[in-house]
Image (cartoon, rainbow, N blue to C red):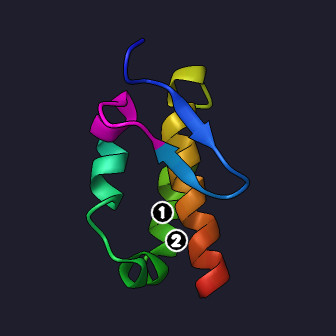
Amino acid sequence: MVGDSMVGFPINFHVNAGHSVLKHPLYLKWNIRTIEYIIDNKATLKTDIKAVMATNENMPVLWYLTSLYRIVNVLA
């Protein structure tokens, strides 16, 4: 698929412009929030992660959400 390649680094999340994850409802929910907000709402983020089905199609959004979760754990 054009625009759906993913690049992974040990802890960082990055996708090319146009990747389908950029339109996922959970990506859209969390990408507008500051890290401070996410730290304060870490339990909600964890609930969202646990509600995602572990399918191949959902791996990009799980990667994004778990990257956020790791970041807030480091900073909290």
Please tell me whether residue 68 is drawn above or below residue 64 in the rendered image: below
Asked whether the residues under the numbered discs 1 and 2 touch, taking CB atoms below 8 Å apart as contact, a structural biologist would say yes
Residue 56 on the magenta segment: no
Q: What's the CA distance linking mark 1 and mark 2?
A: 5 Å
Tell which residue pokes out farthest to the right in this image.
10
The image quadrant that residue 6 belongs to is top right
Q: Tell me the magenta residue range.
A: 15-24
Q: Quadrant of the C terminus?
A: bottom right
Residue hosting label 2:
43
Q: Residue at x 51, y 53 (%)?
A: 65
Residue 23 on the magenta segment: yes
Q: Residue at x 56, y 76 (%)?
A: 72
The image quadrant that residue 63 belongs to is top right
Q: Is residue 51 visible?
A: no
Q: Residues within 10 Å of mark 2 (few under 14, many from 20)?
A: few
Dot label at residue 67: none
Q: Position of residue 1 (x, y in %)?
A: 42, 11
Query: Which residue is at the front of the view, 58 or 16?
Result: 16
Please tell me whether residue 10 is drawn above or below residue 57 in the rendered image: below
In the picture provided, is 74 more to the left or to the right than 25? right
Query: Which residue is at the front of the view, 48 or 4?
Result: 4
Indicate the amino acid at tag 2.
Answer: Ala
Tell which residue pokes out farthest to the top in this image.
1
Residue hosting label 1:
45
Q: Position of residue 16 (x, y in %)?
A: 40, 36
Q: Position of residue 69 (x, y in %)?
A: 58, 65
Please tell me whether residue 73 is drawn above or below residue 24 in the rendered image: below
